[in-house]
Image (spheres, rainbow, N blue to C red):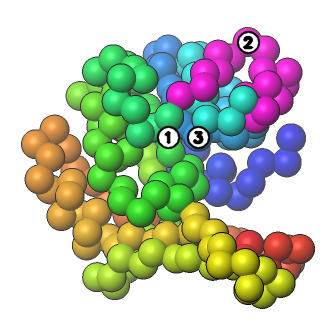
Amino acid sequence: KKPKEMFKFIERKAFNKKRTLNKEVICDFGCAAGEFLYYLKQKQPNSSFLGTDIRMDLIRKAQKILPDIKFLKKSVLNKKSFSKNSFHKSFLIGVHPIFDEFEKCFSNLIYWTKPSGKVFICEMFNPYPVDVLIKYRNSSMYNKGYYESGWNIFSEKSVSNFLKKNKSIKKFKFDNFEMPFDLKPQTDPIR
């Protein structure tokens, strides 16, 4: 009920400040507990929505809040999850940084999205030509030998090179998002 600023930004970019009159089929890959779909449903009531995630606990939570939206346990890495050209708009928000390679999930999104459709991939991209793979651990775990990942930042250059090679991509762009206010520090220092 209190949408993230990023959700507002994405919705404005995806729908050009107007409601979609046609009934579009929209999928949020890695939907977590359905927060983005909850917001989109209010803004785009004529569309049909689907959410996917690999965690059943999050899917169950989403189903309770949004019983009229279908949620499936599917991975963005499994091309067989959906047929070619299934969606008008595909969203991947905050998911691809968990992977050490972005190509497979991006390829699948392109495959699943209709030729006239759009794919929105939302997360940080490095404006410098450097792909950064991040491994980290809390200092309280320093002697455990365990590192977490999930905050990788791929460069705009690498992503552009990949997209330019795909003949089904007509155009793409990177949009800058900036929070309209400062964020308070979180309990988890990596956040």
Residue situated in front as seen by the camera: 31 or 47: 31
Kindly identify the amino acid type of the residue bearing the numbered disc 3.
Answer: Gly
Kindly identify the amino acid type of the residue bearing the numbered disc 1.
Answer: Phe
Q: Which mark is residue 173?
A: none
Q: Residues within 10 Å of mark 1 (few under 14, many from 20)?
A: many
Is 146 inside the magenta-drawn segment?
no
Is 64 inside the magenta-drawn segment?
yes
Residue at which label 3 appears? 30
Q: Is residue 58 left or right of residue 27?
A: right
Residue 81: which quarter of the image? Answer: top left
Q: Residues within 10 Å of mark 2 (few under 14, many from 20)?
A: few
Residue situated in front as seen by the camera: 186 or 57: 57
Give the mark toward the camera: 1 or 3: 3
Q: Is residue 167 above or below residue 79?
A: below
Q: Secondary structure at mark 2?
A: loop
Q: Earlier in the sequence, mark 1 or mark 2?
A: 2
Residue situated in front as seen by the camera: 22 or 83: 83
Q: How many marks?
A: 3
In three-dimensional space, the C-alpha distance between marks 2 and 3, rounded to whole angstroms, equals 18 Å
**Quadrant in which the C terminus is drawn:** bottom right
Q: Is residue 135 above or below residue 128?
A: above
In three-dimensional space, the C-alpha distance between marks 1 and 2, rounded to whole angstroms, equals 19 Å
In the rendering, at what x and y percent does residue 168 appear?
A: 16, 38
Residue at which label 2 appears? 68
Kindly identify the amino acid type of the residue bearing the numbered disc 2.
Answer: Asp
Q: Residue at x 73, y 86 (%)?
A: 142
Span of residues in magenta: 57-74
Residue at which label 1 appears? 91
Q: Residue at x 28, y 82 (%)?
A: 129
Q: Earlier in the sequence, mark 1 or mark 3?
A: 3
